[in-house]
Amino acid sequence: MKIDENQFFREITLRICGSLDIEKALWNCYLYITSVIPADELILTVYDPGAGTLDVVATADNKGGMNRADKVPMPPDLQKQLEDPSKFPRVRVSHDVYQDTIVGLVAERYRWPDSSIIVGRLIIEGKFVGSFIVRADGKNRYTKEDARLWSLINEPAAIALANSLRYQELIKLKELLADDSSYFQNELRRGFSEEIVGAQFGLKSVMDQVLKVAPLLTPVLLEGETGTGKELIANAIHNFSPRNNEPLIKVNCGAIPDSLIDSELFGHEKGAFTGATSRQRGRFERANRGTIFLDEVCELPLHAQVRLLRVLQEKEIERVGGAEPIKIDLRIISATNKDLRKLVEENQFRDDLYYRLCVVPIRIPPLRERKIDIPALVEYFMRRKAKEIGLHFIPKLVPGTMEQLVKYDWPGNVRELSNAVERAIVIHRGEPLGFEDIVGIKPVSDETEDRGREAADLSLKNMEIQHIIRAMEMAGGNVEGQNGAAAILRLNPGTLRSRMRKLGIPFGRKTKALYAGQNRSTGL
């Protein structure tokens, strides 16, 4: 039967370029091609030079079109041949598919019966990008006339493939953006950043280290007890870094079950395990070009430590069930409330991982070592918690309460103080706040123990701090004036301010609320 070449070209072009869904386009082509030449299946492939695979992206047969995602590895010698356009003709016929060095590997993958094929090599800008293949059951099914007809449709097939690939890439990017948007909205709802209270006083040395390390890509290990504010310091490092416009992804390593840790951190491919119904990116992949914060890194199981070590060494990850490494560029900040060196000695944490994470260690002191920050923290939490609860005013403290709060050791650190303030506001509801029934602060009745406490606080510096704070409380936070702290202490106001700066005692208009309600009638 004589075939009109113009009509053949027109029909194939309209059908294969008629839909961005390549499986639909291929199915429409199949319906027409079967009336012209022998055809039991159409196959469209893409060559991936990076992975060295020939990827089957779509097929069509009498059951319809189907998207595929099958990668067929090519031996190194065949990769070189595929990348050289001169090694193969643009169109070739194989009367026995299993004798074809390249498509034969695809045939083995799909266990085709003995078949004949016509292969059209798709070349774009001088580069081999894929193949458009027609297959018919049986050997010796195609003629030279069939091959000549197939050569007519190389260009429209290449255009359709390129358009479809770009369309699929746009769909994936849209899905990634939607996924990221949902993830970051959840992060924002959690309260992505908070004010660092004490940055100029008890945490000054910590903030000095933060400012030094933030512009670098060096891994940082934050060490400190539970509730000291390690997450806030991680926020500060990210915000002061050149990556502050990129994501900061936070992971609580102790909150993820061992069986899910690899999937959560590194992602998984569809079908990697029961319930993996779609590809899922992990936290490391989401943090690409940004920062990842690994809180409680000491809780990572050993198998996850091995994969994390590879991230630090090779700058790449591999999804669970995946076969290809994914390059990533990120900064790692980790935190621990345990002694990692001791865990290394006990073989519970890898020593090589420890030394890579602990390039710059930053110790965050517990609240009992920076009691100078307690007044500012109490004022900050009273403002914030009152707003959250819906009060239209800031509560006051029962006279003498601040001194008790400063004396208390706060084993739960800043988190315990925050919770105590919130409980006090809820219980007292508008009345001056007292904490005796909240945190168990009780006056010491044992005279011996009382003397022991006093002896522990008898350093000259500590006595001077307490002396100035008491004067500020009596003066209602005022340094100058007839009833100001300077007048009470019989000092020049400038001298007192200089001394307060040196000792790290807060003063100024913003700190007056710290001393309000603390004025006592007793002298110094």
Image (tube, rainbow, N blue to C red):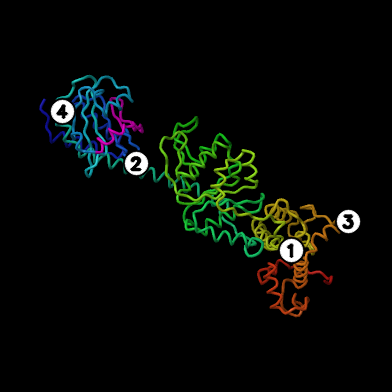
The type of residue carrying mark 1 is Lys
Q: Quadrant of the C terminus?
A: bottom right
**Residue carrying label 4:** 146
Residue at horizontal 52 percent and vertical 37 percent from the top: 262
Rendering coords of residue 115 (x, y %): 24, 22
Which residue lies most toward the right here? 447
Q: Which residues are magenta?
A: 57-83
Residue 185 seen in the figure: no
Q: Earlier in the sequence, mark 3 or mark 2?
A: 2
Residue 367 seen in the figure: yes
**Residue carrying label 1:** 396
Q: Earlier in the sequence, mark 1 or mark 2?
A: 2
The disc placed on residue 448 is 3
The type of residue carrying mark 4 is Asp
**Residue carrying label 2:** 168
Along the line of sight, the residue nearer the viewer: 346 or 386: 346
Discs 1, 2 touching: Cβ within 8 Å: no
